[in-house]
Image: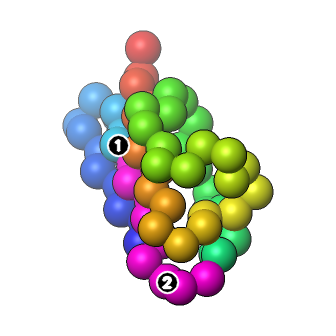
């Protein structure tokens, strides 16, 4: 799952999650700050149950 919300100002919130029973390739992430990641040790892929929340703010 890769869901993105964008404001009129250009800020974006992205939530990426893997509900599959196997690792998935990392999707393109919005540039910005990582607010939270369930499995931060898995940098190259989304492991089962992994979730990433990212925020891009337009200055």
Q: CA distance from mark 1 to mark 2?
A: 22 Å
Question: Residue farthest to the left?
Answer: 8
What span is in magenta?
14-22
Mark number, residue 13: 1
| Left or right for 16, reference 11 | right
Q: Quadrant of residue 53?
A: top left
Q: In the depicted view, which residue is nearer to us: 27 or 57?
A: 27
Task: Give residue 40's position: percent from left, percent from top.
Answer: 60, 43
Chain-order first, disc 1 or disc 2: 1
Question: What residue is drawn where x is 62% and y is 57%?
Answer: 28
Looking at the image, what colour scheme do you see?
Answer: rainbow
Whether residues under marks 1 and 2 lie with C-beta atoms below 8 angstroms apart, the answer is no
Q: In the depicted view, which residue is nearer to us: 6 or 14?
A: 14
Q: How many marks?
A: 2
Residue at which label 2 appears: 20
Question: What residue is drawn where x is 55% and y is 50%?
Answer: 39
| Left or right for 34, reference 41 | left
Question: What residue is drawn where x is 28% and y is 29%?
Answer: 9
Mark 1 surroundings within 10 Å by alpha-carbon count, few (fewer than 14), some (14 through 19), many (20 or more): some
Callout in the foreground (1, 2): 2
């Amino acid at each position: 799952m890769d869901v993105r919300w964008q404001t009129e100002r250009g800020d974006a919130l992205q939530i990426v999650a893997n509900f599959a029973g196997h690792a998935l390739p990392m999707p393109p992430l919005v540039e910005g700050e990582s607010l939270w990641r369930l499995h931060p040790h898995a940098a190259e892929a989304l492991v089962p149950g992994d979730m990433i929340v990212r925020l891009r703010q337009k200055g």
